[in-house]
Amino acid sequence: MSALQNDAVTGRRPLGVMAALPQELGNLIEVMRAESGVRTITHGSRDYHVGTVYGAPCVVTLARIGKVAAAATVSALIHAFEVDAVVFTGVAGGVGREVRIGDVVVADTLMQHDLDASPLFPRFEVPLLGIARFVADRSLAAQLAAAAERFIAEEGAALAQRFAIQVPQMHRGLIISGDQFVASAAAVETLRTALPDALAVEMEGAAIAQVCHEYGVPCAIVRTVSDTADAHAPASFATFLTELAGTYSNGILTRFLQARA
Ligand code: SAH
């Protein structure tokens, strides 16, 4: 497939916007449809929605769940759609002791907690790349964090009251990814012991960060905490996904994209 998307009007390369599940995108595609119309291109069993948000060209897509799905999707964004940066939004399990349901975590670094080629390579290190922790783009992560801070300041108290959660807090630091839905006190404790600075666990972020690192494309990841990766996680995840994931994504992405416009 040929390179697609230097925006005809602005000449700018698009921003890639990803989530795993539709609820995690909020109404971004509708916003794009209202502003510019949306062209949907199917590639590698996924739909890529091309348009503009606040005048900025974007390609919005759903990766589905897991590291392979995420890596395949972000590769297509880079190769077929020539995005100049990637932002991922979604939910995650809280791992840090201070991290509560409804909090927001923006990654400074990301790693794959289930990658272990020891004793040939150090545990967690990506073999032959020599890296365990991938660094999110500083400027993009700072913009995402600023948008999340504004969202929390403007809407956090009302959300807390309405959904009986604590007033949301912002965290910056390590997000860990693996091909498991973590849903037991024992499993989350094992992760805390192995990686004491981990704030949240999910299933895509570090794969995206690795591909972006290898292609030199800036990326940033924001996660809202839907559960605490323990026995309550399946129910908490499902409720949060239905009731709140879209509100957080809309609130954060709108402010992020508006500030970039
Ligand atoms: N049964 C669910 C599967 C969801 S997997 C379904 O039918 O849709 C969980 C998704 O949310 C993944 O995309 C992952 O990135 C994130 N996530 C949220 N909580 C998580 C947790 N406790 N462990 C791992 N990933 C989690």
Image: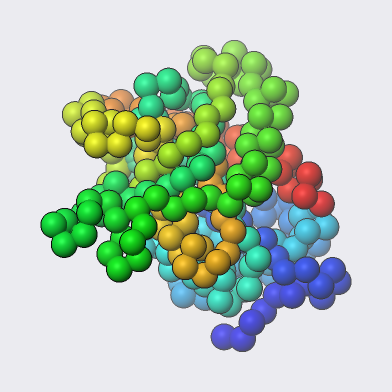
Q: Quadrant of residue 8?
A: bottom right
Is 28 in front, or is 223?
223
Residue 235 can be seen in this image = no
Q: In this rendering, would 113 be left or right of 223?
A: left
Q: Quadrant of ligand 1?
A: top left
Q: Residue at x 22, y 51 (%)?
A: 123
**Residue 163's spot in the image, x, y percent?**
54, 19
Does residue 150 lie above or below 201 as drawn? above
**Residue 176's spot in the image, x, y percent?**
37, 43
Q: Residue at x 16, y 56 (%)?
A: 118
Residue 159 can be seen in this image = yes
Is 250 in front, or is 109?
109
Does residue 243 lie above or below 81 as drawn? above
**In the picture, which quadrant includes the N terminus?**
bottom right
Direction left: furthest residue: 119
Q: Quadrant of residue 250?
A: top right
Q: How is the image coloured?
A: rainbow
Direction right: furthest residue: 9
**Residue 107's spot in the image, x, y percent?**
50, 42
Does residue 116 lie above or below 39 as drawn? above
Q: Residue at x 41, y 33 (%)?
A: 199
